[in-house]
Amino acid sequence: MRSFKWESESDNMPIAERNIKCKNCLSTRFKLKAKGLCSRCYSLTRKFKIVEQWNLENIETLKYYPKDMIFHNQRDFNKIKNGFIRQLEDRLSYLQSNEEMLGGAVNGVDIVPRFQKVSELAGSRNKDFLWHEEDLFDQNFTSKQKKILFSILNQIIESIPWRGIDWNKIFR
């Protein structure tokens, strides 16, 4: 299980000496909210800490847990808690890897999933959109053009709010 560091030596440093990067995603594109985390990572990390403390025996700890008593059994509890944690970890990891890609070289392998995500968000049912078409971008676009295309696709994806926990994934 992933653990998140809330405090560090830099928390006690003067603002001018602090690193302005988010401690999780390393982004400098978003304002830091608290504990050295940008607003995107802070809310996810905060929710992660709450879910980590869930205890079926103590109903007061079950913030974000389904209120319906049908889910208040050990089997469903374990499945829901583990599913929440896994999805929050995945989202935090995604934000981190996304920032790494924005700062590095971009290839067709990076662009195709972005097109697929935009296609999915637009409601396309074609899950194989641009499947194995990485060479299309690598052979027809310069490095600069690929970077611009990647950035535009990323802006489209980021403009759509994350939908949160996917309950279907938890109960699959």
Image: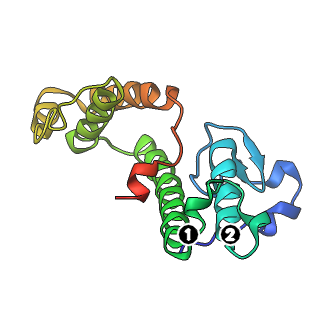
**Vertical position of residue 63 compared to residue 59: above or below:** above
Q: Position of residue 46 (x, y in %)?
A: 71, 56
Query: Quarter of the image holding residue 161?
Result: top right
The answer to whether residue 106 is left or right of residue 94 is: left
Amino acid marked by disc 1: Phe
Q: Which residue corresponds to mark 1?
A: 77
Q: In this view, does 79 lie above or below 157?
A: below
Residue 21 shows up from this direction: no
Q: Nearer the viewer, residue 64 or 101?
A: 64
Of the two numbered discs 2 and 1 on the same chain, state the one appearing first in sequence: 2
Q: Is mark 1 on a helix, strand or loop?
A: helix
Reply above or below: 69 against 150: below
Which residue appears at 33% of the width and 28% of the height?
A: 118
Answer left or right for 168 relative to 22. Answer: left
**Residue 123, image x, y percentages:** 31, 25
Q: Which image quadrant is residue 24 in?
A: bottom right
What count of labels does the image hold?
A: 2
Q: Residue at x 48, y 68 (%)?
A: 79
Q: Residue at left 49%, top 74%? A: 75
Q: Can residue 25 be seen in this view?
A: yes
Q: Are marks 2 and 1 in contact (CB under 8 Å)?
A: yes
- In the picture, the disc for residue 54 is 2
Front residue (pair 121, 114): 121
Q: Where is residue 132 shown, x and y percent of the image?
A: 10, 42
Q: Where is residue 56 in the image (x, y as percent from the top left)?
A: 67, 73
Q: Distance between the residues labelled 2 and 1?
A: 9 Å
Q: Residue 98 carries which label?
A: none
